[in-house]
Amino acid sequence: MGRKVKILQNYTPEQVKAFFDKDDKYKIGLRLYAVYQVSIGKSSRQLEELYNTSFKQIRNWVNSFDSNGIEGLRDKKRNGRPGRLTPDQMAQLQKDLLSLPDTYGYNTSTWTGPIVSDYIQKTFQVTYKQAQIYNLLHELGFSYQRGRGIYPERNEDLRAQIKTEIKKL
């Protein structure tokens, strides 16, 4: 009785929900349909669970639509601190991060937050806090990858080769 039936085979609910965030048209359509449901008599409290938002937000959509039409359902441009790197510098950083760090004089083959921070400081004379570096990397389309240690003693082929070499001695 309490068992959920899996309806979707190829998408998770999170992936379906992500479509609303990716395309402004979907988001506006969803909000417009909520406004429509309020207009035919449904209360915003009845709709809040269905739309996964607060009843107050649904009321805001209704009021904004009533005042400004479809334009009122669009997300407003949000203010924020402008980036410290110019778009050209961001493009250059993205291109440079596709190369290995040893190309730029670092004694490693993996970009890490501190190394990226140091590289930005030396190249563009801009300082970022380490936490912001990861946001910057995400904005450039990079993701955090956890390094994995290589332990030669765990490699069976190498282990067999070493045994063979020892036997020869």
Image (cartoon, rainbow, N blue to C red):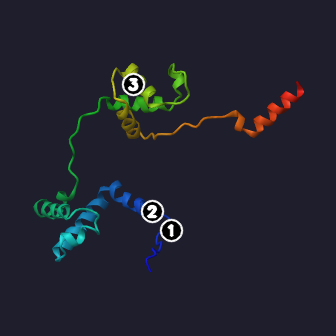
At label 3, the amino acid type is Ile
Q: Earlier in the sequence, mark 1 or mark 3?
A: 1
Residue for badge 2: 12
For this view, does 28 lie left or right of residue 6?
left
Q: Residues within 10 Å of mark 2 (few under 14, many from 20)?
A: few
Q: Residues within 10 Å of mark 3 (few under 14, many from 20)?
A: some
Residue 164 lies, in percent from the top left, at 85, 32
Residue at image position (37%, 40%) is: 139
At label 2, the amino acid type is Thr
Which label was assigned to residue 9? Answer: 1
Q: Is residue 33 above or below residue 20?
A: below
Q: Earlier in the sequence, mark 3 or mark 2?
A: 2
Q: Residues within 10 Å of mark 1 (few under 14, many from 20)?
A: few
At label 1, the amino acid type is Gln
For mark 3, give the secondary structure: helix
Residue 143 lies, in percent from the top left, at 46, 41
Residue for badge 3: 120
